[in-house]
Image (spheres, helix red, strand yellow):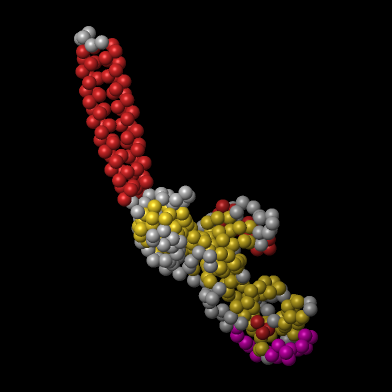
Amino acid sequence: MAAANPLVAPLQDNILLTGQTSATASVDLVARVPGFLREVGFADGADVRQGQLLFRIEDDSYAAQVALAQANLDQQTATLKSAEAEFARQETLRKQLVATQSTYDSTLAARDTGRSAVAAAQANLKVAQISLAYTRVEAPFAGRMGRRLVDPGNLVGSGAPTKLGTLSQIDALYATVSVNERDLRRLQAAMKERGLSREALHGVPVQAGLSDEPDLPHRGRLDFVDSGLDTTTGTLVVRALLDNPGRSLAPGLFVRLRIPLGPPKPALWVPAAAVGIDQAGPSLLVIDASGVVNLRRVTLGPARDGLQSIASGLQQADRVVTEGVQHAVPGRTIVAVPGAIGAPTVSARAE
């Protein structure tokens, strides 16, 4: 039989939750003017840059409307220029008392009418230019396109806006999780211990990973904590912002999210094989100064790499039977050789 003092190694206390990713920004691209779809400027699922042409609707009639509106504006501008010149002449004659009041009033009305006509022509030109611009559907931000929903040659935007596709921003992703009441109490206790307010949770670093990833390689931070529990589920909604520089994550994936409850703390570790469990709970065999074996009830923490952390019931100076546990009987005196406990490969985490 062998005995050793428990190993002291850091333990990071965390909450491990499952959540789902979503895009930080997503927009449905629609046809805002009627016409036949002429061009699709991306491949389904492709990454696109801001301002890239994604869809083009036939624009011949809209370009003609712009030209017509411009011609009308030019005509109204020329008419106004003539009316202003005539009004200026009549105003000079009126000061010289050689122009009649009715002639002056007529030229004043013609000038004001001309100004209104120019303003209306400018507005009509602006409307025509906007309609022409709507024939080009461009990416409002850099992101990833879904599949196109309409093929070239189809009539779009007739009667109601036609959805053409969806663009999602995925350089960073949201991961939304629901914290149950038990974990919420752990979180609140950790915040109270550290003197943190609820607002201080924003910016807390987190780690995330997919179900088939051995570790949690993705990094991020908390950016939203709901104001209260959902009365239906009894959970608190928490959201993290995950960095996604390689765009390896996508919206809609389920991820494991690890939220730290504080800095790592020293913990006592023993071999998992040294722990006995019966109806009364977990226990260890501890050898006192006289060499007598005693059964010690303990509270377990997390396990890792074949080691078991002990939350309470054990002291660093205690000698724990680590090998030959099945031969050690409480109440008997034994002679145990010194044993050793290897440290975990990485700092363990309570989850």
As for residue 328 lying within the magenta part, the answer is yes
Residue at 61%, 82% in the rendered image: 306
Q: Name the magenta segment's main secondary structure.
A: loop
In the visual, does 334 lie left or right of 93? right
Compare residues 272 and 244 and report the one nearer the observer.
Answer: 244
Quick one: quadrant of the N terminus?
Answer: bottom right
Relative to 96, residue 339 above or below:
below
As for residue 153 lying within the magenta part, the answer is no
Compare residues 4 and 135 and report the one nearer the observer.
Answer: 135
In the visual, does 123 lie left or right of 302? left
Quarter-of-image position of residue 265 = bottom right
Percent of width and height locating residue 259: 57, 64
Percent of width and height locating residue 239: 55, 59
Quarter-of-image position of residue 55 = bottom left
Quick one: quadrant of the C terminus?
Answer: bottom right
Compare residues 336 and 266 and report the one nearer the observer.
Answer: 266
Percent of width and height locating residue 322: 66, 86
Marker count (numbered): 0
Compare residues 128 and 10 and report the one nearer the observer.
Answer: 128
Residue at 44%, 60% in the rendered image: 150
Q: Residue furthest top?
A: 97
Residue at 64%, 74% in the rendered image: 302
Residue 138 appears in the picture as rendered = no
Quarter-of-image position of residue 317 = bottom right
Relative to 110, residue 67 above or below:
below
Relative to 161, residue 263 above or below:
below
Q: Which residues are magenta?
A: 324-341
Residue 308 appears in the picture as rendered = yes
Residue at 79%, 78% in the rendered image: 279
Percent of width and height locating residue 307: 62, 80
